Amino acid sequence: MATATKKAPAKKAAAKAASNGAAKHSAASSGTHTNGSAKHGVAKASKAIPPKKAEGSFSEIPGKYCVRDIALADEGRKLIQWAESRMPVLMHLRDKYKKSQPLKGLRLAGSLHVTKETAVLVETFAALGAEVSWSGCNPLSTNDAVAAALAKSGISIFAWYGNHEDFYWCIERTIDLKPNLTLDDGCDLINTVHEQYADFARKEVIGGTEETTTGVQRLRARAAAGRLFYPVYAVNDAITKWDFDNVYGTGQSTLDGILRATSVMFAGKNFVVAGHGHCGQGVAKRAKGMGANVIITEVKATAAIKGVLEGYRVMTMDEAAKEGDIFCTATGVKDIIRKKHFLAMKDGAIVCNTGHYDAEINLKELAEVTKSKRTIRENCEEYTLKNGNKIFVLAEGRLVNLAAAEGHPSEVMDMSFSNQLMCHLKLAEAYKEGKKLPNQVLDIDPAQDEFIAETKLRTMGMSIDKLTKEQLAYINDYNAGT
Ligand code: RBV
């Protein structure tokens, strides 16, 4: 193993590892950092691999993995086993297909939060025969112990917590695998493949999947512009994904993130949720459950009415800025909270985001009205404004549920990631049968949703009723009336 050691200690990374209950950070050995060789470059687009820029120590085998510390592997393995025991549908699929090896001969590159749940998915792909290469999809969401466990078990992985400088470097290393399948959360991999390796994308990639709402928005925009070069399943839009992961997953993990970063009391607070889509609904529900007074801001009248009928107050962000104690953005849109809002906020307001990208809170504009800034605790920064007020920003405005907590619970990711797996099985099957799927954003087969929901229920020990023949006939009878 080659481990590169550079000067600055990676404080945040070590802290995150510690907060994950990981073993103490340790560099296994030291050596000169190299960046792999040109032979790993993708066919036509092969160019010199740019150097990794991050400082701190890494465990690295060029071309194979680059993680923070391979010594954390045992810690990560325990977390993965914990997740496995709470992801029965995905484990059922692993068992069902491991003998027939439906992904054998295929190479899959993924860019998705390196969490214990993602690890279960990655190892399922590998168990079904795929060669897998992985990177994170957010600078602050990698669990270093999990990344180490994956690297140790032979997965090609390039990811570490606090990866700001080398985010795209890591994605490019996964493209070195020359993937025929891509898996995205937020479209960064798809965008990189399309923009930098267009020829390769057109000719070599069979298809892909996209995990999240904003990623699917990007994909649809790409398809509308005629710039989508292979078919991509919109996993996010599966019922068994967005009705559960986006609502209950986001609701719980977002509050979890805010609590871990602040330990603030929710009861009695004015909790402003920007965006009342699926994710915002989850956050609002859970905040209300903890006794907060929920305020919704929206641009869509129907989503706003849903909020009103849930018993929330609805107002513009200009109004909400003056009232909120805690703000959480969940919109997928940029500049939701900007200079005039920061200036209108109460002293002590807490601001965070749970949307995929970090564009929802305009931190540049916050900096313009800030006198000084200091870190209060991990993932909590205090900004003292020129007007004397203090504003606390969590997790640098990045998705607070993954940066400050552990993302959604395993139980709900079980359904999301079963969808991921089943879509890749479909892509593989079509490919093996010589069927060409259209270069479009593909919908999820309702039968897939039904299968996943039924299996999930069964694993929870619950049964549902079946329509009788007479009931079926009744609902299909256009003449039935009063
Ligand atoms: N997400 N993954 C996790 N525990 O692995 N938690 C959340 C996890 C995904 C979720 O599906 C959402 O669509 C996406 O992260 C946002 O980037």
Image: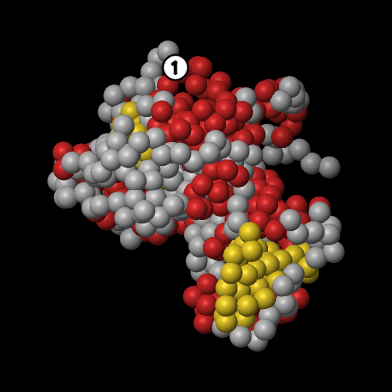
Q: Which residue is mark 1?
A: 98
Q: Is residue 439 visible?
A: no
Q: Is residue 101 above or below residue 427?
A: above
Depth check: give the residue in front, 299 or 8: 8
Residue 361 is at least partly visible in this image: yes
The residue shown at (25%, 52%) is 51
Where residue 256 appears, x then y in whole percent?
Answer: 69, 49
Q: Quadrant of residue 412?
A: top right
The amino acid marked with disc number 1 is Lys
Query: Is 301 rendered above or below residue 174?
Result: below
- In front of the other: 437 or 96: 96
Task: Name the spot of residue 94 as percent of width and height, x first.
Answer: 50, 21
Which residue: 67% across, 76% down?
Answer: 390
> Disc 1 beta carbon < 8 A from ligand 1?
no
x 27%, y 45%: residue: 33
In the depicted structure, whether residue 288 falls above or below residue 125: below
Decide which of 43, 138 is in the foreground and name it.
Answer: 138
227 sits left or right of 467 in the view: left
- Picture quadrant where residue 164 is located: bottom left
User: With respect to residue 177, does 56 lie above or below?
Assistant: below
Q: Secondary structure at mark 1?
A: loop
Density class for disc 1 (Cα within 10 Å; few <14, some 14-19, many ≥20) is some
Tell which of 202 and 290 is nearer to you.
290
* Screen quadrant of the N terminus: top left
Q: Residue at x 45, y 27 (%)?
A: 123
Q: Is residue 72 left or right of residue 135?
A: right
In the image: residue 102, left or right of residue 313 = left
